Each structure stands twice: as C-alpha cells, then as structure tokens.
Image (spheres, coloured by chain):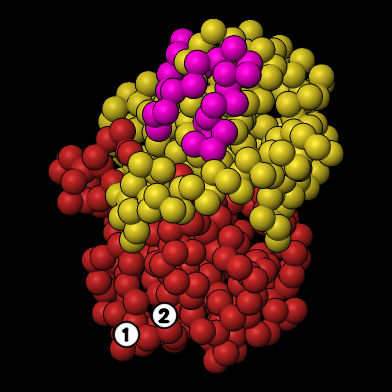
Chain colours: A red, B yellow
C-alpha cells in the first residue's frame, strides 16, 4: 500500500507529519514524500526542511494521496499549477482514498476533484471551498465517497486515525493510537472558533481578510 | 529566542514536529533542527527524512532544547553517546527550558540531567526512568524546575502549548492553538493505557518486554 504525501514550498509541517505518524504505522504501508521535484522542501515556519524522495512523475499510482495545507502564499501557486492538478487528477483515478488536511482541500478543489462534494478546511479558509463548487462543512473530518478532508493542521491526526480504522479495522487503529499515546489534553480550550475567546477569533478573521485582500491587490 | 530540536537516526517524527509546530509560532522564535552532523536524518517509520541544519557543535547556547524520543533501537545509542550527553549538559547550563517528548526523557536522564527529579515518558518506557534515579510520573506533561517532559509522541503538542503559555502568555498560546485548530476529536478512545482495551495494553507490554529482552541479549 503506497501512501504519497505531497509536499511543496512552505507547506505546514504538522499537516503532513500528523497523518504520516499514523498511516506509516499501518501494516504493509509504504509512505513516500512526493514533491514536484525531489530534494529538500521548506516548511512554512522556517528552520525545517523535509526531503521529497520522489517527484510526482515517479509516483503515478499511489493507493492513498494526502495533500497538506499551508498559509495563503504557499497554497496560492498550488491552486494554479497545471502540473500539480494534472498529477492529482491522474492519481485520483486509482486511489482508494484522496485526502487533505487544512487548506489542502482548496488544492484538491482547485484541481476539480471535489466539485459537488462536501468537504472541510482550516476554519479561516472554509468558505473559499464554495468558490470551487464545493459544499463547505464545518466538521473536524468530512468523508464523501473516496475523499476525506480534515480541518486545520492538527485535524490531520484525527483524519488519519479514522482512515486507519477504515483500512485496517478498529483494533489496528486503536493500537496505533495507543502507541502514539494520543490522549490529548490541551492546556487551553481555544482550538476552535466555537471555543476560543471571541475577540481572538474576530482578530484572526480580520487579519486573514486583510492578508487575502493584500494578495488579491498584488 | 533560539529553540534547538535535537534529531538523530530513527527519531519519532511527531515527537519533534508537534513541538516545532507550536514553538515556531512564538514571536521571536527561531527553530534549528540540530543533529550530531548536519544533513538528512531518517525518522523511525521510514520514508521521511528531515534536514539537520546545524550540528551540535554549532548550537552551544540555545534558549530551549527539545529532545524527541524514538523506538528502543533508535534511543539506545543516544543513551550511551558521550558527545550527545556532553552537549546536553553544556546547553542545559544556559537553557531556560530543557524539554523532552516520549523516550527523549530517557536521553535527558541518561545524560544525568533529571537525577532526583519528577519526569514522564512514553507509557511503555516510564518505569525505566527509575534506572537513572528519576521519579517516573504518569502524567501527560510534567514540569520540574526548568525541565518539562511529555508522555508519548503526541503529548509533545500539549507540552509545547503549556510551554508557549509560560513563555509568551495565555493569549499567545491560545492564538497558536486556534491557528493550529487544535481541538482534538480522536475517533477512538484508546490513547492511554487507562482507556485502551485491556488486552491491547497487555499485548503491547508483552511485546515491549520481549523486544527489550532481545536487545539486552544482543
């Protein structure tokens, strides 16, 4: 079972590594970090590069593909890149699961793979799915057919565990969860716009709109 | 504020990337992945290498050091390596926080940094802390003086958020949590030996002892 995790300049590290940590533990799984070119790929926050060990042309038939998200400046080229979209459409014909984390769903949507489907994304980007004819759903993990999309960043862990259960059964998924000691105890309760302080949510929405506006103006 | 994340052959990816994702978002933070040598470092499950951008000799005075864990075969050399222990003892003299995730606490303990202190580790490795004169504590995150240790793998996220709150205040930590959408919803309830099915816990304990026995016999 080949699992391709697509990486690109300034992707968000945990978007990719959360699912990697879960899915690489599936019996028979082989994970390949796949980029447009092989070599180091820098993550969004700096100081960390992961190696893309294969290029997209070398990975034509993965069983599962996972597309992480990133900040607007990182995802923008991926929303427009013909080669990446062609590859995603090609592999999607054969995958049993095509998955995304965070704004990775915008990339799948831009490639035309989610048209008419339900999907989720980072809470700040969720409504942008509608621009691509996708129905935005404010849930942690959304499954529609062979597509599974996760909310922002850390939601990729929950997505991958759900996927592990579907692929290998509940007992295997539970064994992976226990080995990862995934018994989360966040020290604060601000992980969702529903639970975070309202002024914090409002500030981030404003910053996000301002930043989107600046991008559009450039 | 320089944050050194120490990486070594077959470390567990999420042990390092969980804290990276949180701590790299702290205002003024600069993260450096630090290895015994610079260059690619393979993680334990295969298919993923991260780049160590600095060697330990190039990072003598980080403000924070984070030591991830790994499976027994990966941590064993780190429990015995004089150079790594010397570096850890050196940097520990100046760090405001010396942190570990998972079996990374065994490495800190083997370097003599946790003697007489309370600390935690992966649930399967917890009791081994006592071999180094450390008091094992079965909690998600344990703080003792300038030392902060986390339980297995995913606990590094909770540890780093607690640390972010201490360093930059509650509001900053909450903003980081919201940006990461860290509102965990595990699809199963098997993340701790207290909640996982008893037979799964027993099987893992047996496998772990067998594997430790094989290591001792070699």
Q: Residue A208 or A66: which is nearer the viewer?
A: A66
Q: Point out residue A58 in the picture as x, y percentages from the top left corner.
A: 75, 79
Quadrant including the N terminus of chain B = top right
In the picture, the disc for residue B50 is none
Rounded to the nearest angstrom, the CA distance separating label 2 from label 1 is: 9 Å
Residue A85 on the magenta span:
no
Q: Chain of mark 1?
A: A
Q: Position of residue A102 (x, y in %)?
A: 41, 62
Q: Is residue A32 above or below residue A58?
A: above
Residue B138 visible in image: yes
Q: Which residue is mark 2?
A: A147
- Looking at the rendered structure, the secondary structure element under dot 2 is strand
* Residue sitting at x 15%, y 43%: A198
Q: Please report whichever mark, 2 or 1, sits nearer to the chain's N-terminal start.
A: 1
Depth check, mark 2 against mark 1: the one in front is 2
The residue identified by callout 1 is A117
* Residue B40 screen position, x and y as percent: 78, 47
User: Residue at horizontal 80%, vertical 43%?
Assistant: B39
Q: Can residue B130 be found in the magenta stretch?
A: yes
- The range drawn in magenta is B121-148
Question: Which chain contains the residue that carries disc 2?
Answer: A
> Where does the image place residue A45, in percent across and percent down from the top left?
54, 44
């Amino acid at each position: 079972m080949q699992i391709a995790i697509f990486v690109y300049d300034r992707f968000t590290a945990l978007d990719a590594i959360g699912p990697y940590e879960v899915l690489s533990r599936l019996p028979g799984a082989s994970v390949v970090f796949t980029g447009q070119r092989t070599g180091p790929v820098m993550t969004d926050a700096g100081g960390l590069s992961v190696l893309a060990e294969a290029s997209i042309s070398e990975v034509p038939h993965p069983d599962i593909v996972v597309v992480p998200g990133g900040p607007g400046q990182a995802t923008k080229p991926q929303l427009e890149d013909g080669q990446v979209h062609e590859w995603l459409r090609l592999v999607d014909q054969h995958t049993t699961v095509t998955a995304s984390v965070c704004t990775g769903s915008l990339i799948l949507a831009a490639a035309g793979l989610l048209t008419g489907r339900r999907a989720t994304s980072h809470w700040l980007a969720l409504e942008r799915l509608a621009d691509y004819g996708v129905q935005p759903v404010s849930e942690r993990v959304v499954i529609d057919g062979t597509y599974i999309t996760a909310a922002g960043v850390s939601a990729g862990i929950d997505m991958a565990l759900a996927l592990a259960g579907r692929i290998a059964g509940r007992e295997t998924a539970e064994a992976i969860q226990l080995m990862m000691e995934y018994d989360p105890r966040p020290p604060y309760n601000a992980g969702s716009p529903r639970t975070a302080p309202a002024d914090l949510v409002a500030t981030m929405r404003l910053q996000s709109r301002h930043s989107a506006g600046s991008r559009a103006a450039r």
